[in-house]
Image (cartoon, rainbow, N blue to C red):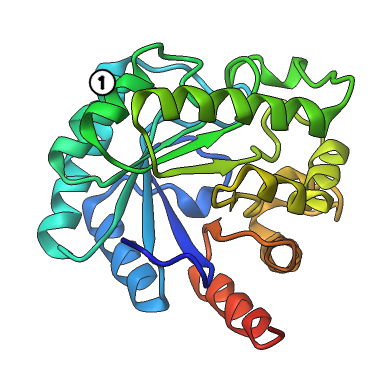
Amino acid sequence: MIDLSSPKVMGIINVTPDSFFSGSRKIDMDAILQTTEKMLEEGATFLDIGGYSSRPGATDISVEEEISRVIDPIKTIIDRFPEANISIDTFRSEVARKAVETGASMVNDISAGHLDESMLSTVADMGVPYIAMHMRGTPQNMKELTKYDDLLHEVVKYFSSVLHDCNRLGIRDVIIDPGFGFAKTAEQSFDLLNKLDHFHHLDRPVLVGISRKSMIYRTLNSTAEEALNGTTVLNTVALLKGAQILRVHDVKEAVEAIKLVNELS
């Protein structure tokens, strides 16, 4: 129901104490609501709520803990901002189901169903859009799994298989995310960004999530807190190569990038 002919912005709200970017950690409900209001006012089309930190080496938590982190924020946001389109950022089918039952309308899965064999059937049963990301392993070991014979070929093949499974189960609205930084070095992530237009052969919307990531701040010898300018630069590159959704910590700057790039067409 959302037109992606003009790119849209997904705002990140992490209800975790250990996300890599300190500015995205929102534990207090007042802070969550203030961030939600600000992102919606600045033009976010989606809000991505996550209760499990997927940064490299992040601490694993139980399903119960993840559910306890995300359900109240989703319910409170929906009660206050019923127009909000909430995505649940999880690789666990039980969390996804609980979140959608509470009011989320999309599932964002960093593992594309590979870490929970029930995820795809659960998404199919709920009939919601699905974001499938490429990664290898888990957040705890993905940094050790960056060896590829042909990165682009292997990632495209991965998505072809995922899309086949989704189609077989009746999941029609699938968005693909190349997974920048997930089981990829900075050099590999830049290579994928440079070749982003190749993913359009899969005939699915492409989401780019590079906001304040280490591929930016380590290249610039800075920090995640100082990576907004670099994020905007790479988001602009992604837009020029056909990205349809930008997943970001900073909504205003992403919306402005979209408006300016749209003037080129």
Instruction: Using the image, determine if residue 214 lies above or below residue 122.
Output: below
Left or right: where 239 falls relative to 1: right
Instruction: Using the image, determine if residue 216 lies above or below residue 170.
Output: below
Where disc 1 sits, the SS reads helix
Quadrant occupied by the C terminus: bottom right
Quadrant occupied by the N terminus: bottom left
Which quadrant of the figure has residue 189? top right
Q: Nearer the viewer, residue 141 or 121?
A: 121
Residue 149 placement (x, y as % from top left): 89, 20
Q: Residue at x 17, y 46 (%)?
A: 103
Residue 10 placement (x, y as % from top left): 45, 58
Instruction: Say whether residue 193 is visible.
Output: yes
Q: Residue furthest top?
A: 117
Q: Which residue is mark 1?
A: 94
Residue 27 placement (x, y as % from top left): 32, 45
Q: Which amino acid does the dot numbered 1 rest on?
A: Glu
